[in-house]
Amino acid sequence: MTRSTPIEQFRRGVELGDPERMLGALAPGAFLRSPVAGGLRFEGREQLARLFGVTTAVYEHIDIVHDFGDGASWVLGFRARIGKQPFEETLVLGLAVHGLVEELTASIRPMAGVAVVGSAVGKGLARQHGRARSFAFGAFIAPLVGMARSGDGLGPRLLGPLGDVDR
């Protein structure tokens, strides 16, 4: 029986929505840079366990589309949805000794996807501090989600011939 590498373990955890498998691939000092808030970092296993617990609960229909790298870094890209909103996420993984994942930098597109991920994950994390905080966070971010979803449909139409609208 062959043993999987940390990258294979992490990828499988993403595919299966298994936060424990994802955590098992991390180096002790691992951290993730948020794709939503520029200065927000999730540091250490405790914070990452909470984050992965929420993301695996809200991400649906994950389809890995990119999986490549070398000895020092790896790129894992996937398509997913939250409710009716599709999005693409790219994780650039910095690897430590023995191939453990030490650094995660996440990027999400399109803008409506960023907003919906930020809303769903933010509410899930806020809920860990009580329902009132989750409700307040949801009320705070709702206008952004609405604007991003509207812009996702209207923006390409306003560009006209400058952008190829695939709808």
Image (tube, rainbow, N blue to C red):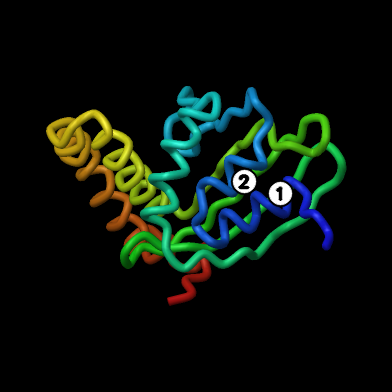
**Is 123 rendered above or below residue 164?**
above
Alpha-carbon distance for marks 2 and 1?
6 Å
Residue at the spot of label 2: 91
Which label is found at residue 128?
Answer: none
**Quarter assignment of residue 58:** bottom left
Element type where label 2 sits in the image: strand
Q: Nearer the viewer, residue 17 or 39?
A: 17
In the rendering, at what x and y percent does residue 90 appear? 60, 50
Residue at the spot of label 1: 75
Element type where label 1 sits in the image: strand
Amino acid type at circle 1 is Val
Q: Residue furthest front?
A: 1
Amino acid type at circle 2 is Leu
Relative to residue 32, is residue 140 drawn left or right?
Answer: left
Q: Which comes before the other along the chain, label 2 or label 1?
A: 1
Q: Residues within 10 Å of mark 2 (few under 14, many from 20)?
A: many
Task: Find out whether the residues at labels 2 and 1 contact each other: C-beta distance under 8 Å.
Answer: yes
Figure quadrant of the N terminus: bottom right
**Is 119 rendered above or below residue 98?**
below
Q: Residues within 10 Å of mark 1 (few under 14, many from 20)?
A: some
Q: Residue at x 44, y 38 (%)?
A: 51
Q: Residue at x 77, y 30 (%)?
A: 96
In the rendering, at what x and y percent does residue 152 appear? 37, 59
Figure quadrant of the C terminus: bottom left
Q: Residue at x 23, y 51 (%)?
A: 146
In the rendering, at what x and y percent does residue 136 appear? 15, 33
